[in-house]
Image (cartoon, helix red, strand yellow):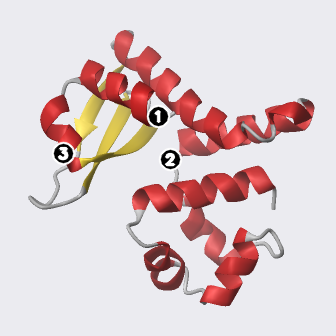
Amino acid sequence: MDKILIDIILATVAEKYDDAADFYKVQLGLDDHTWQLFKDGVIPLPQEVMPKVLHLFSDYEWMLIQKVIRNASIHPESRETAPGDYRRAKIEIANVWLKANIAELDIAEHEPHAAFINARVLTSYGDLITFRIPASVSNTINGDQHKLLEWANKNLV
C-alpha cells in the first residue's frame, strides 16, 4: 500500500476517532500488532477490512486521494507533502463550492459536551467533503460557511 495512502488513512482516523483503537479494534477487528505493521508500511490491511476503511472517506474524497497519489507518482518531489496537499485541496475545493453557491454547509448534530463536531460540505450532485472541528469552534462559526472556511484555512492546513 502506498505510504501516502497510509498517511492519509492514519490522519483521517486521528481526525474522526478520539482513540485509533476504536477504529482498528472495534471497526476493523484488528489487533495492535497488525495495526502497527500496517502503520509502518510492512503489511497492507487485509482485503476484507478495506471496505470499512473506505467508509472513512466520501466518494469525492477517495477520488481526491487517488489524484494526490497519482500526482506524487508523476512528481516524486511532492511525496512528502502529499497528505498536506490532500487536506489543502479539500479546503480549497470546499471554498470554491461554497463561494459559487453550488454546495451547502451542514454542521452535524452533536452531544452537548462533545469535544468535536462534524461539518460537511455537500453539492447537489452528492459530492461531499467532511471536516472535523472542535466543538468550541462551532459556537464561533454558528453555521456560517465563510467562518468555517476561514477557520479551516488557518487551522487545518
The amino acid type found where label 1 is placed reads Asp
Q: Position of residue 80 (x, y in %)?
A: 77, 41
Query: 34 or 62: which is nearer to us?
Result: 34
Query: 90 or 140: which is nearer to us?
Result: 140
Eye-nearest disc, 2 or 3: 3
The residue under the point 18% across, 45% down is 136
Task: Please count the marks in the image.
Answer: 3
Eye-nearest disc, 1 or 3: 3
Q: Which of the numbered marks, if any, corresponds to residue 136?
A: 3
- Image-quadrant location for residue 119: top left
Asked if marks 2 and 3 touch (Cβ < 8 Å), the reply is: no
Q: Is 20 placed left or right of 100 in the picture?
A: right
Q: Position of residue 134 (x, y in %)?
A: 27, 48
Query: 141 or 48: which is nearer to us?
Result: 141
The residue under the point 65% across, 33% down is 85
Earlier sequence position, callout 1 versus callout 3: 1
User: Circle 2 sits on which residue?
Assistant: 58
Give the structural element (helix, strand or loop) at label 3. Answer: helix
Earlier sequence position, callout 2 versus callout 3: 2
- Image-quadrant location for residue 77: top right
Above or below 66: residue 124: above
The amino acid type found where label 2 is placed reads Ser
Label 2 crowd bin: few (<14), some (14–19), many (20+), radius 10 Å: some
Q: Which of the numbered marks, if any, corresponds to residue 127?
A: 1
Asked if marks 2 and 1 touch (Cβ < 8 Å), the reply is: yes
